Image (cartoon, grey):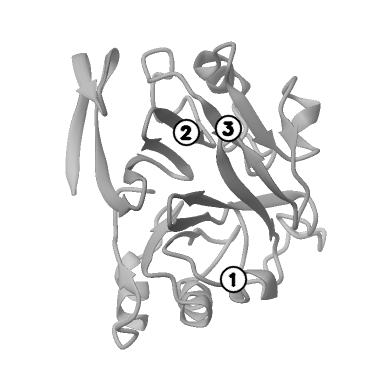
Amino acid sequence: MKKFLLGAMVLVFGVTFSAAAQDTFETDSIATSAGDLKITFIGHGTLMFSFGEKIIHVDPWSKLADYSTMPKADLILLTHEHRDHLDVNAVNALRKNETVLVLTETCAKSVNGGVIMKNGDVKSVAGLEIEAVPAYNLVHMRSTGQPFHPRGSGNGYVIRFGDKRVYVAGDTENTPEMKQLKNIDVAFLPMNLPYTMTPEMVADAAKAFKPVVLYPYHYGSTDTSRVVDLMKNSKDVEVRIRKMK
């Protein structure tokens, strides 16, 4: 695990940029057949990937970083329309002429341009194979009885980087579609209540589809030690905890 500091001028993944805010983001590197995948843990449900010459941002949120100073995006993935996942100002700050957006139908109502993906779609975008996985609630509901995330509205994404498949689940629970996933090398599973999963739900899903590496993310005040304990006997899944409140 590595860390880098935003502030003054900083060299990140071969890209130099400045930042007004003083924030330290953790980073990890995953070896693939096409070079290293570098993961930057911005926080909450927000990630940045660097792969070859490509910069990929997932659900950028201005509350967590000054995106006017961040590396511009070759690809932006938006999982759903909630304000902590769809931040138009952050998207606009990251876009350049060649930037490709992958987003849901609902997100497309707020952001112009982009490739709309529906649950189950598989497309080649910006040179990467991307699969849209359903992201929705089974149990946790609003006081009206409506799920926080209705079925068919949000996406998780499986992105292929070389020979590695990375699953960013978005806001969801341990759905049947998630548990049927195959050959996932890295998985980001949300664990914040009451909107997504309990540690028990995360463990249930991870034990079903067995990612090589599991990152609980978007976990708020949830005690991450609980999922570590629940997974302690699942030797085929490595649980990594990073700063992703």
Q: Which residue does the numbered mark 1 point to in the structure image?
A: 181
Q: Quadrant of residue 171?
A: bottom right
**Image coordinates for residue 166, horizontal then vertical, percent:** 47, 55
In contact (CB < 8 Å): disc 3 and disc 2: yes
Residue visible at 44% across and 44% down in the picture: 44
In the drawing, does residue 241 fall left or right of residue 57? left
Mark 3 belongs to which amino acid?
Ala
Q: Amino acid at mark 2?
A: Ile
Q: Which residue shows up at 54% across the image and 37% down it?
A: 59
Relative vertical location of residue 93 with respect to residue 221 in this rendering, above or below: above
Can you tell which of label 3 and label 2 is closer to the viewer?
A: 3
Q: Label 2's element? A: strand
Q: Provide residue 204's location: percent of width, then percent of height.
A: 51, 80
Label 1: which secondary element = loop
CA separation in Å, label 1 and label 3: 23 Å
Mark 2, Cα crowd under 10 Å, few <14 / some 14-19 / many 20+, is: many
Q: Whole-Å distance between the Cαs marked 2 and 1?
A: 22 Å
| Residue 29 horizontal side relative to residue 211, left or right | left
